Image (spheres, rainbow, N blue to C red):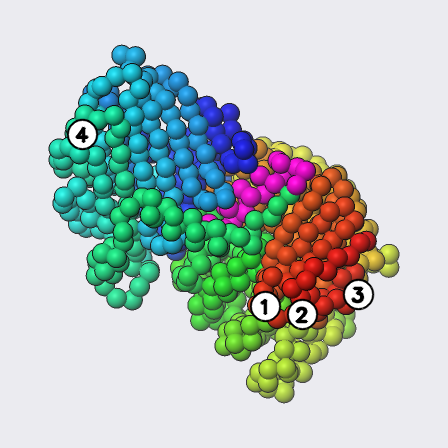
Amino acid sequence: MFGLKNGNFCEWSYDVDKEPLLATLFTTGNGYMGVRGSFEEFGSLRIQGAFVRGYIDEITEVCEPFANNEYMKKFYLNEELLKSFEKQDSCVNMHDFLFVRVIIGGECFYPWEGKVISWERTLDASNAVYTRRVVWEDSKGRQTLLEFVRFASFANRHLYCQKVTVTPLNHEESVEIVSGVDTLRKTCGQIITATDNVKVCDGNVFHRFHAVNKYKFAAEYAIKNKFPKGELATYEENGVVGVRCKAQKAKEYVLEKFSFIATERDMDGDMSAFVADETAKIEYSFDKQRALHEDAYKAYFDLMDVQIEGDDEADGYLRFASYHTAISACREDSVHGISAKGLTGERYNQFVWWDCEIHQMPFFLPTAPETAKQLLLYRYRMLEQSKKNAIADGKIGAKFAFCSSVNGDERVWQYARHPFMQVHINSDIPMGVLNYYAWTGDKEFLKNYGLELMHECLRYWTCRVVERNGRYEILQVTGTDEHHPYVDNDAYTNYCVQFIFTRFLALAKEFSYELTAAETQKFEDIAARIYLPNTDCGLIPQFDGYFSLSRSLEQAGGTSLKQFQMKTSGLYHKSQIIKQPDVLLLYTFADVGLNKKGYALNWDYYEQMCETSSSLTFPVHAIAAADNGRMLSFLNYFMKTLQIDVADIHGVGWQGVHSGCLAGGYLSVLRGIFGVCATENGLKIAPNPMPLWKKTSIKFTYCGRTIAMTAEGMKYTMRLLSGAPCTVEFNGETLTLCDRVVEKTL
């Protein structure tokens, strides 16, 4: 059994069948590292996982899809390339530093042996601390209370802290504790790391290893153990290197374990010297480090923490979703972006997708803009390689990888046809730049990085558009709806491209960004004449010929790939059934300023056509439902956004969280309920009253200011908490926000 308890995410009985899913849900992390919720006493395949952002190497990826219907033969699989596909980049499953074994009277504690008298695991999203309390009875009837507490420090991103407390309840048997590193860790079922050096000294472990295949990045652990009083000995068994403590008899036995993790990707200088210097500064007190961690985490999480009164389930699960988003992105560097699973699992190899700019970064813009900036700086670091990608494609400018890894070269699985056509990534990144500037007003970023990023993407688009029928068209692409590859004039792509051309030209003029006269003329021409699909009634066709397709789905074949597991493989190219929203993104996450007159019409139509086989659907539909006054529908999609993994809606939660979906929880409230949008013309607020909640409170940053809002029935309050006074547009009325409360009733 698991779910919310006292506002925290809890598990209150042990179920071995749920271990893989709960390992995902109980992940602890800080954006630099993510550690799955495996047990200290054992971490098996599919359950254990420890990942450091951007620590990547090459694997042999075993892939056995097969084309079993016309759609997959034509559009999804390149079966010739499938024959030769073997190597792929992937995040590396780090050596397991959680390892702790407790031996009581000669019997090792495992929850599947002996008898579990009581069990409770808790992940407190308000302080990012994981706790497990177990009363365990061994084969001789001896009962022992074991408490495990751990966290990835927000005060020191390299530091992971554990505390294990063992309390005999009805016996005085001797207790032994083993603490170490399990080096037999596999990535995609393969061992792709090798140990370079191990040293055990005074109860502590120093461990250096490296990835062995392609990038060969090195990593180093410095583990400090504070054992109870007792006799220490080196422990080496079955790949584990550590220390065994035979404790002196006591009423309570406490281990405090501090693991310092560093990789070559963290620094330019000598890694071992860095580790030695940094570990010498640490005060090795669990309580002290917990206090530092909680202070740092709460300061970071404060703006992310929405309060919903009158719906405890929505309130608790939203906090849990925002916690998982908070630990998905590195706050302090641009070594990597955000992957589809954050740092909670191996699935999708820790690649950075279009989700980053459109679904995930928007969470950080109003809550942690410096983190959002790092995500765009990662893209800037990939710019030179993206220019090479464009040249290889016979184009100019920059072509960003749809699946981006360490170098910025394309890491799409070569046998999958349609991702190569998802060139909307080259408009998604400029959209991210524009959104960042609208929320932050960061002119220095725009001048030093943002305008160049946009410019190179637009240069690519000048080669990708085709002039025909007296207009510019974009042919043979795949939109965000991957059920329909190789389409012409995908609405999402065309509208976004027009928007970024228009906005770039205005910003280039404002900032005196240097463009040739010929380039300026070309950009202006494309912005003016690019085809924007529409109909007389305002219903936007998702692509050319979309409305001529069947409104039902012909079934054929079995199941072969994840995206088809929700139903038997359909002939999607003959049907209007879509995987996820495409057109509706233009009104929500990728707001391009469409006239809202056609919004309800498009929402009504495309909601019915969407089978929601992508988790990214739910927050888009939540916002669209709120904007169109369907608050029961909003609540339905909102809760699916929050519970995508808790309820395991798509049946793959064990692989890692759906990070882009979870980020949409906060955004569904900010954008959907409060109607807050940052535009080139300033902050606009157009609330959508939520009668099913008693009171909702939110805070966010905007251009160096912190603003608090509440919604209670039809009454809205706004207050400037910090920063200079500013004007906002509230339902068309201009208001000035200062340190006094501004109240409006709809």
What mark, if any, has residue 733 been given in the picture? 3
Measuring from the top left, give residue 358's x and y in whole percent: 59, 57
Spatial separation of the CA atoms under disc 3 and disc 1: 22 Å
Spatial separation of the CA atoms under disc 2 and disc 1: 9 Å
The residue type indicated by label 4 comes to Ala
Q: Is residue 509 or residue 469 the one in the foreground?
A: 509
Spatial separation of the CA atoms under disc 1 and disc 4: 56 Å
Q: Which residue is mark 4?
A: 247
Measuring from the top left, give residue 402's x and y in whole percent: 52, 58
Measuring from the top left, give residue 117's x and y in whole percent: 39, 18
Of pointers 4 and 3, the one earlier in the residue sequence: 4
What mark, if any, has residue 723 been given in the picture? 1
Measuring from the top left, give residue 84's x and y in whole percent: 41, 49
The residue lying at 33 percent from left, 44 percent from top is 287
The residue type indicated by label 3 comes to Glu
Q: Is residue 693 above or below residue 15?
A: below
Q: Which residues are magenta?
A: 309-327
Label pair 2/1, CB-CB below 8 angstroms: yes
Of pointers 3 and 1, the one earlier in the residue sequence: 1
Crowding at mark 2 (Cα within 10 Å: few <14, some 14-19, many 20+): some
Q: Which residue is mark 2?
A: 726
Of pointers 3 and 2, the one earlier in the residue sequence: 2
Q: Answer yes or no: is residue 36 visible.
A: yes
Secondary structure at badge 1 equals loop
Instruction: Choose mark 3 or mark 1, whichever is in front.
Output: 1
Secondary structure at badge 3 equals strand
